[in-house]
Amino acid sequence: MRLIIAEKPSLARAIAAALPSAARREDGALVAGDTTVTWCLGHLLEQAPPDAYDPAFKQWRLDHLPILPAQWKLLPRPKARGQLAVIRKLLKTTREVVHAGDPDREGQLLVQEVIEYLGWKGPVARLLVSDLNRPAVQRALARLDDNQRFAPLYRAAQSRARADWLYGINLTRAWTLTGRQAGHDGVLSVGRVQTPVLGLVVRRDNDIREFQPRPFFVLWVDLAVSHGQLRAWWHPDETHPLDDQGRLLAREPAAALAARLPGASGHLASLDSQDKRQPAPLPYSLSALQVDAARRFGLSAKAVLDICQRLYERHTLITYPRSDCRYLPEEHWAAARKTLESACQNDPTLRQWVDGADFSRRSRAWNDKQVGAHHALAPTGKPADLSRLERHEAEVFRLIARNVVAQFYPPLATREVKAEFLIEDQRFRASGQEILEAGWKPLFTTRDQTPPLPPLSQGEACRVLDCAVEDRETRPPEPFTDASLIKAMMNIGRYVEDPAVRRTLREHDGLGTEATRAGIIETLVERGYLVRQAKALRATRLGSALIASLPEAVSRPERTALWEQRLAAIAEQGDDPSPFLASLVEDLGKLLATADAPRLSHALQSAQGEAPASNPRRGGKSTRRRRTPPSRSSNKPRSRRGPANS
């Protein structure tokens, strides 16, 4: 018997459907001829807690730190024991094992750690499936690879999991115990990803709190030109008091100019007209969908993820949702018309969009080179009766379908015009946009665009009809929302100064993953570090105090970039993981030495932030002392994929 171990049930079903023989269902597996396909349920195993290495570690003590396992151990996740037993039984009767994890670092780890944990010593082949379409799976089955070729990928993923454990376990225990010395009763959780995310929000809130508004002034003129009227804005030169964004900081120059302008004449000094063509937005990755759904419908990132899981698993209306890719396999293009007509037939809006599509078009979205472990979110082709879905499920499905349908619409064609007038030897600028061909745009918004300017010609005369000086104030940055925080995590390189670090973060998809970002935000809310105020995410006093008490390097994203550089060298160049982990252990020693009760006490007393309802289990303040330190289970965020401590 040949045993194929898939990462998840949906992949197992796709593999079984692509086999020559019809599959029958057995306990935890699908059997097709001499091939059995079984599956994991995400991670079946997890890093063992500290007390699995030494019972003394069950009690949290500073003199135990750092905890450094000599031989790493894995334990079954409580809900995974049944499926692990199924795989153990099947391995006893197989002659060949096929590893069918996702074709990425985490997918390599997830299945291989099960194979090794269960003691399989025989040959292992590697099946790489990035598209669940039956012909694509059949082609993948015909070109199995040797799993040994992917050993560096496995070592990199294993190193990342161990590093996250070392980092999260040791720093969380250190700050929790130091917090008790400072009078705080509760877990102070620290992680490589969650803490920099919290740091983003704390620093943004501090910027808002410390913001000092400054007045600035703008002067506009309404001009009569040969073929109509337009409004232009004064652009003062450097002889006037300007800030770093070119805003006028004194009213007097604008007022003095405004007094001379009524009835004044001038001419069009320069005219720039450009025709532009903008292709349709690409189909969604999960994070991109979370950003749009949060903006449009006020949904949290976690809510969008949960909705997508239901659309995928319960309703089977969309493809695998936890994808970081915005491209589709090229072979899907030929079947797209049939897929979309079927999927959208029961919804008037979607059906109208499909009817207007030109399925002979081939957009940039169909690109095998851009498809990694998963492709972009797309309808499966199953007819969607949106009246039977919950309101938000229908809204999210419509977004997903729309972005795929839009690939069969023409580009948005616009003419953008910029004009500069000289009046009283001063520059006044106007801009406008004319839509030449709406293309895909009506599928996305009905809002008015920037109004076009009237027809203009170089050198033509103009006359001032009206003018005014407006008093304005600089505004503080906006607080983070689910949408903007997810976007910040996707583009975390914008928040670092070092160009090399920025480049690494950009290459490795930012902070967190598609599968973990929503969970990280929810974890920070549940632990009392963040609180939701309408759509805004604000740091609590506890969250602000934690960031203030930590070394700055712990609350910034640069560490993720440095780790990814080392992990990439392990995965792509076969580097030995030992120096990476040794360097982390050395770094940990320095970080643990900074855990300081007086500093933390001061941070707790002086922190500014929001105050959610007190809940000691979630990290709220309490005067009650626990006699037993919290267990590791209260010390980590959970996700279907990813490390225990992130």
Image: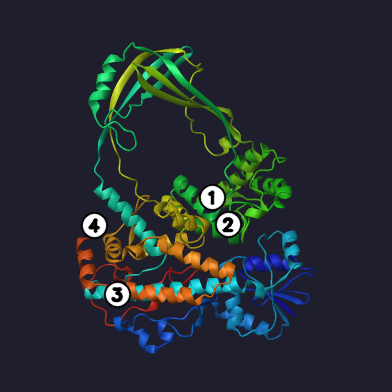
In the shown orientation, is residue 90 left or right of residue 178? right
Disc 1 marks which amino acid? Val
The residue mark sitting in front, 4 or 1, is: 4
In space, the residues marked 3 and 2 are separated at their CA atoms by 48 Å
Query: Which is more N-terminal, label 2 or label 1?
Result: 2
Q: In what quadrant of the picture does the N terminus appear?
A: bottom right
- Of the two numbered discs 4 and 2 in the rendering, the one whose residue sits closer to the viewer: 4
Q: Which mark is residue 396?
A: 1
**The residue tagged with tag 1: helix, strand or loop?**
helix
**Residue 311's disc number:** 2
What residue is shown at x 45% (from left), y 58% (from top)? 501
Kind of residue at badge 4: Gln
Q: Which mark is residue 613?
A: none
Task: Give the Cα distance between marks 1 and 3.
Answer: 48 Å
For marks 4 and 2, give the CA distance.
41 Å
Mark 1 and mark 2: Cα distance apart in space: 9 Å
* Mark 4 residue crowding within 10 angstroms, few (<14) / some (14–19) / many (20+): some
